[in-house]
Amino acid sequence: QSDTFSNGSKRKTIVILGSGWGSISLLKSLDTSLYNVIVVSPRNYFLFTPLLPSTPVGTVELKSIIEPVRSIARRSSSEVTYYEADALKIDPVTKSVHVKSVNENDYETDLNYDYLVIGVGAQPTTFNIPGVDKFSSFLKEISDAQDIRLKIMNSIEQAALLEQDDPERARLLSFVVVGGGPTGAEFAAELKDYVDQDLSKWMPALSKEIKIAIVEATPNILSMFPQNLIDYSQTLFTKGGIDLKLKTAVKRVDATTIYAENRDTQQIEEIPYGVLVWATGNAPRDVSKDLMQQLGPEKQNSRRGLVINDKMELVGAEGSIYAIGDCAFYPGLFPTAQVAHQEGDYLATVFDKLHKIDQLKFTNESLNDANKIKKNNAKIDKLYNKIDKFHYHHYGSLAYIGNEQAIADVTVNGFSFKGAGAMTFLFWKSAYLGMCVSLRNRLLVAMDWCKIYFIGRDSSI
Ligand code: FAD
Ligand code: NAD
């Protein structure tokens, strides 16, 4: 679309970094005819993260939970430009972003913006614990799910070649998850389902030797839930044979063993592993850290991410840079899809008002009548005042805990529900189907769930 509107005013450029929950919600709600919209992300698809823990073991196929950015952009009111690239550096003074293509040609360029939305998410944190980066798998991206799957299959096949009393066989069949947050707990539950429901049919003896453990530094897993739901989940896990190593903090990892400290006894326990999945939460990405440094510690003083105000403006670059989702920090807002989604929707309404303000400002430039200018300025002030603060609505939390059971602590339309079990699992399923970003995703996920009832999970690489 053209660079100017019919009245001669310039069409402003919004550069959106990222194609995750925050950025895609913004893109879906934004009136793209009002701006020149450029999306930059190394990932040319949206990833429905709530079902990512189901993918390494094949409960849900990876293709079912992704939606191409271009297919989402095509549904918007006007043209959207997408660049498959990483944002390396943001210059808030010249209002430009330095980006680099993700393919091997390494093309680099600078993109100028009037408004920048940072939605780059976060990276897995390792707390700089030695060996974690080198030896463990994370569960954040599609490539992580593929990596975990490969390691599980390889470990099982290698173990099958060894004698039953060989300690190496026991090590290979020890699957350890570090971090009992929802990512770690949901993945452990999916892994247990896979072993009990599928592997047990093909390798009955070997499947019984598989050990699954969750190592968690605090006294509970799934600590965001009320205590009765935590107790329910922990009992289900323990009864099912998942070893919960609570109050145990990992201190070091090498190629075969995890060294973890029991917080009560201060004793170091050595836990041999075949596959190690690391899920201890988030840390800011390099591009966010660099921007925080540029703006200085008086403005950017959180280790958790880019400090924003209650209108999603980046503190230190108000009026031009916004940050949403996991890369942003505002007290009381947690790094969840729910928050990122609502922030993206909110920013679309902000940009609607900013466009009206920009148009009035443009009109003022060509006016000589002081009265009319005054009236327009009053309208501009009114519109600025109409930009409400962001209000987060917490609908609650859901988690899959295995054996076709889930826990829920939700409030929808004033109706509160706290529950656990098989019926809650059906609720969990319908909630996640409803949250899928496209009809295509919804159908594919529903088909995957049906498929495992009839033919089981796919165990090939
Ligand atoms: P993301 O969705 O992570 O997207 C970030 C985007 O930025 C990606 O497209 C990425 O490729 C891109 N990017 C990265 N670096 C750059 C760069 N340098 N330049 C440009 N783009 C870049 N939350 C819930 O509320 N409910 C759940 O059930 C739930 N389940 C989860 C399960 C798992 C396994 C995980 C890992 C998280 C889960 N979450 C859940 C949390 C939720 O996924 C995040 O809070 C959410 O994805 C944050 O959205 P975002 O847009 O900030 O970041
Ligand atoms: P998290 O921060 O929620 O949990 C990480 C866990 O790792 C914590 O319980 C912490 O005590 C533990 N830990 C940290 N260091 C450790 C160590 N050295 N040894 C042992 N344990 C250690 O991380 P997450 O589960 O990856 O979740 C990230 C975000 O995504 C959260 O905001 C979460 O709410 C959201 N999420 C939500 C869902 C859901 O709603 N179903 C699912 C996945 C993720």
Image: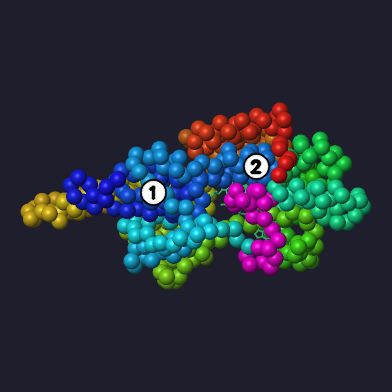
Residue 330 in picture, x, y percent from top left:
46, 57
Outermost residue, left side: 369
Outermost residue, top side: 454
Q: Look at label 1 and name its amino acid.
A: Thr
Taking the spot 38% from the left edge, 51% from the top edge, the residue there is 38
Q: Residues within 10 Å of mark 2 (few under 14, many from 20)?
A: many
Q: Residues within 10 Å of mark 1 (few under 14, many from 20)?
A: few
- First along the sequence among labels 1 and 2: 2
Outermost residue, front side: 105
Taking the spot 31% from the left edge, 43% from the top edge, the residue there is 33
Q: Is residue 95 left or right of residue 382?
A: right
Disc 1 target residue: 81
Q: In this view, does 164 lie to the left or right of 392?
A: right
Taking the spot 53% from the left edge, 59% from the top edge, the residue there is 104
- Say whether residue 360 is visible: no
In whole angstroms, how far apart are the C-alphas of marks 1 and 2?
32 Å
In front here: 301 or 14? 14
In front here: 396 or 91? 91
Q: Which mark is residue 54?
A: 2
Q: Look at label 2 and name its amino acid.
A: Ser
Which quadrant of the rendered structure holds the C terminus?
A: top right
In front here: 137 or 229? 137
Circles 1 and 2 in contact, beta carbons < 8 Å: no
Residue 155 falls within the magenta-colored stretch: no
Residue 310 in picture, x, y percent from top left:
39, 55
From the image, state whether disc 1 or disc 2 is nearer to you. 1
Residue 437 in picture, x, y percent from top left:
49, 38
Residue 32 in picture, x, y percent from top left:
34, 44
**Number of marks drawn:** 2
Ligand 1 within 8 Å, label 1 CB: no
* Magenta part of the chain: 127-148
- The local secondary structure at tag 2 comes to helix
